[in-house]
Image (cartoon, rainbow, N blue to C red):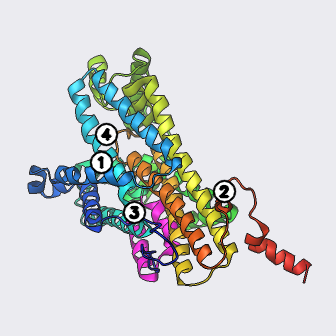
Amino acid sequence: MATNQPLRRNRRTTEEPVYIEPAWPVFLLFLGYMMYMYLQGGVRWPVLGQIRFEFLMGIVLVPLAVVAVGRRSVSQEKPVVGWSFALLGTMLIMVALSHFPAFSWDVFWNRGVKFAAYGLCIAAFVSSPRALRWFLAAFLLAFFKMGLEGLLGTITGSLIWQNQEIPRLHGTTPSYEHPNSFSGTQLGVLPYLYFLYPLLPRFWKILAIVQLILCANVIMRTGSRTGYLGFVAAMLSFIWLAKKRARAAIVTVLIALMVVPMIPSDYVGRFSSIFEDKSEVGADTSIGKRKEILEDATEVFLSHPFGIGVGAFPLVRNELFGRKQDTHNLYLEVATNMGIQGIIVFIGFVSSIWAALSRVRRRLQRHLEVLSGLGLRGEAITAHTADIQMMLACAKATWAFLIIRLVLGAFGMDMYEIYWWFMAGLAVALLRLASAAERQTLALAKAEGRLEEPSIFNERRRALPRRLNPAAASRDAVRNP
């Protein structure tokens, strides 16, 4: 996914390898595990499901990840790691205290421990720029497959059927069969396509545009009001991260004005129904049902402020009210399942990821400024700059992905999903890569006789030294010719 060759271990400018390349047979197994898990290979190939192939791959990968993750840890990752353990620990306690322990254990093991192990593998194996590129390529390929299935299902009509008064597109496997889930999968791809696009060579840009079309088809035709709001959140996050926000906002509005008239009326009406409540007259029962769920969830939380157990809300709700639907709200799901203590831990967990990604963005942005000011030239520095730009794009995309998931959480029960562990693993991996990139820049500067102190990367410095600030140097040249 990049035009430049990655930095290699034996580069002469360093005394020891700055980036730790993963053991590639293990890393390729990890990529296969990731794609198998996202695409639910056990459902697509029942024979592999019967032998628990995914579990067997995990048994091999997790011990290797535990060994690998301890190499060159950085202090900035400790909050993410600490809150991750705290969240898993809280879940385990709420399995023991659950109203339905056996059911809660199943949710905890299959949707907590398994997904946390995936995050651990990301943190352990995505340890170099080349590994990050391969990881992102495999991630996008898995979702490309989902989007392609959605397009074929749209063309043939095999995945579209009437639901809530409009034709809605569904996914092919249980994990994203529901339109809301299917829409959410493609929403998560948008930030990575958007921020990586400028860095891609021409052929990969064409593929990115094709995948963007596939995403748009799924997001629109699933008719998910939750997905529509997530899309709006994605656009707002892109504008916020843009260098020129006003221009980005204007361009977004102009594109929307051109595209909206081409959208089928069913889906335009579906979006507008977000702001209409017809539940009282029975024309649209969806909003009325959600209100009922929220009221039941609030009552359960007030009755059990310390939680009813992991995933136990539908069972408790059925006992109390004779209704089985889940919370349809991430925050009430956390509150009812894990109580007040769970809310505190979840907020800490999400905040640690937010802070880590924000730190990486600031560090890498400053790093690019420092690198420009050093004025180094050559193939090595070109490849190094491309690596940093790719890491920065990934950090921005993951930050935007977090925003999307938090917005979608207001309308879906996503606590026991893979997204959180995906972001936690990437946050740790990017923190490590950012530190390694700074060491590599200092090594390159030393080789060129331009040794600079490590503190030039300090994100708390408000301004770069004038010798590393191209704009200031240009002004000085004009003032003092």
Classify mark 2: residues with Cα within 10 Å, few (<14), some (14-19) or many (20+). Answer: few
Q: Which residues are magenta?
A: 189-217
The location of residue 334, given as percent across then percent down, is 41, 31
- Label at residue 254: none
The answer for how far apart the CA atoms under marks 4 and 1 are is 21 Å
**Disc 1 on helix, strand or loop?**
loop
Q: Main secondary structure of the magenta part?
A: helix
* Quarter residue 321 falls in: top left
- Label at residue 215: 3
The tag earlier along the polypeptide, 2 or 1, is: 1
* Quarter residue 47 falls in: bottom left
| Residue in the picture at 76% in, 60% down | 463
**Disc 3 on helix, strand or loop?**
helix
The answer for how far apart the CA atoms under marks 3 and 1 are is 16 Å
Please name the residue that numbered disc 4 is placed on. 112
Q: What is the number of callouts on the image?
A: 4
**Dot 2 and dot 3 residues touching (CB under 8 Å):** no
